[in-house]
Image: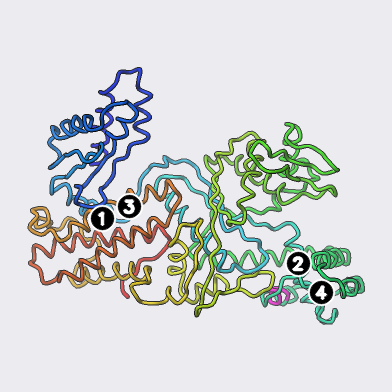
Amino acid sequence: MIGHIDKEIKSFLLSLVDRTNKEKINTIIEKYSISITETLDNGHITTNVCMVAASILKLKPIELASKLVERLSLLGLFEIVEAAGPGFINITLHRKDFVSIINSINGNKQRYGESNIGNGKKIQIEFVSANPTGPLHVGHGRGAAYGDAVGRILKATGFNVQKEYYINDAGRQIDILTASVILKIISKELNEYFPQNAYKGEYINEIGKNFIKKTKVSYENLESVLGVQKLFLDSKNDDEKEIDAVILSLKNLNIDLWDSVKKFSVKEIVDSIENDLKKFNVSFNNWFRESSLGNINDNSSTIASSINKLKKDGHAYKKDNAIWLNTEASGDDKHRVLIRDDGRPTYFASDVAYHKDKIDRGFDKLINVWGADHHGYIKRIEASIEALGSKKEKMIVKLVQFANLYKNGKKVKMSTRSGDFFTLENLIDEIGSDASRFYYLSKQADQHLDFDLDLAQSDSKENIFYYIQYAHARICSLIYKYNKNAGIKNLNLSSIEKDSYNQCDELIHEISKYPDVVTKASNTLQPHLIIFYLRDLSQLFHSYYNDNHVLSESNENIEAIISCLSSVGVVISNGLNLLGITPIKKM
């Protein structure tokens, strides 16, 4: 029905001006809205088109509204069409049309709410991408839940979505991981020497134990490593230099063994990350390795060709034996180093090459889900995208604030380096994947989130996850008691259609809003809008359920009510599924 009204409005707008003002009409079309009303007090459908058109065309909104009301009324399709306020039009549907949404939902089932606004555009969303230096902790869970939910919502609205995890399997952090594992393996020979900045945690021991099951580890002489210990024994604030010296020493002792431990350790952790994410109902279409960008000294590699193009086009230059990127065009506060003065590429160089690779794969949009601490990184990446010949608008960065976990009223620590952290796997084991995802998504991603474990496990009204799931379970129970299945279709709705039973009206009005909510969540990349909507819908349902004894109604009313509540259940189920959460049928 909204589509039909929209078509009439556009025809009305074209009748207001001649062809020379068509540009103004296009501006109006871009700005006006038509949507389901917030409450039934204002009818079923509302539009602000007359207010928007009056402003642009320098006309009186009340006069425009009067003309549009007359035009829409003559169609005979609506019960009431009336002007309201400064240029709003409110439309009340005929009772049968209002109620028809029930059959539409029960007929479409899981497809209700889907659309094709994306029109098949290719979107890549890269998220999580935690360094493979340890298990995922609960701080990573928020980005995982957000990125996956955004991917699901975009797919449901007609986009061709690819989800990608970028594996940082090159660079210094991987060297620290490798050194940590080796030091644990040979700890007895080193009198338990373990630098402060090495990775701690039981998982390092486990990787070492698994490695020596397959490969023998022995060094002829460990004096160079012990020498590092002696050198830094009395040093203060030199922890970074100490671990770098240990890395260099271990590489020099046996580079083949080093490479073998490195490869094994990264695989162990990536496998662990992938398994944890599967438990979290998160999957990826592609796992992209930083190492696949190649070596800077190989001109055919992605990283070398990217840097060479920047130099050739005059965007990168040499200074103090280093290669710099001019990032002024994007508003960055200073130029950025791509290649250090010793010839080693920076992390930034790898990111430049990685984004070039993404663009070369032909995506229409790139969505990067980053931690909020990466805010300062946006402009330099935008500068590199522009310098490599694309538009910075192709990239969208969504920042996710860190999530603080509270258990028994105390904040849980989350430091991978120290080994003292609550893992994502711990969280899933304690409260389940569904409750975890729900609470990660319960607030706008760029806002701070305090995750209360005790609340998430409670069965109170304050636990919104429980409240929504309970609504779905109650509906399933009612349907079961009525001895029908959840696929009820085209039952007798006459008592609702005739308005002899109107207690379900607010529920019917609310479920008609769902497609707009999904569209808005897709356009804004905000999954929490679906949670807010499901909360409101569940509240309406519980209120209705508590005030009405459904199975005590007349047979005619019961059939209409069950059909209506079935459609409410479909909407709750669809909304939860879009968030990667399984609807519960029985509490």
Going by the image, does 174 lie left or right of 68?
A: right
The crowding category of the residue bearing disc 2, from other C-alpha atoms within 10 Å (few below 14, some 14 to 19, many at least 20), is: many
Q: Amino acid at mark 3?
A: Arg
Front: mark 4 or 1: 1
Q: Which residues are magenta?
A: 204-208
Residue beneath disc 3: 111
Look at 25% across and 54% down and name the residue there.
105
Q: Earlier in the sequence, mark 1 or mark 3?
A: 3
Q: Earlier in the sequence, mark 3 or mark 4?
A: 3
Q: Amino acid at mark 1?
A: Glu
Percent from the top left, x then y, of residue 551?
A: 14, 71
In the figure, residue 11 lies in which quadrant?
A: top left
Front: mark 1 or 3: 1
Residue beneath disc 4: 217
Going by the image, does 559 lie left or right of 429?
A: left
How much space separates mark 3 and mark 2, taking CA atoms?
A: 48 Å
Are discs 4 and 1 less than 8 Å apart at CB?
no
How much space separates mark 3 and mark 4, taking CA atoms?
A: 57 Å
Q: Earlier in the sequence, mark 2 or mark 1?
A: 2
Q: Amino acid at mark 4?
A: Val
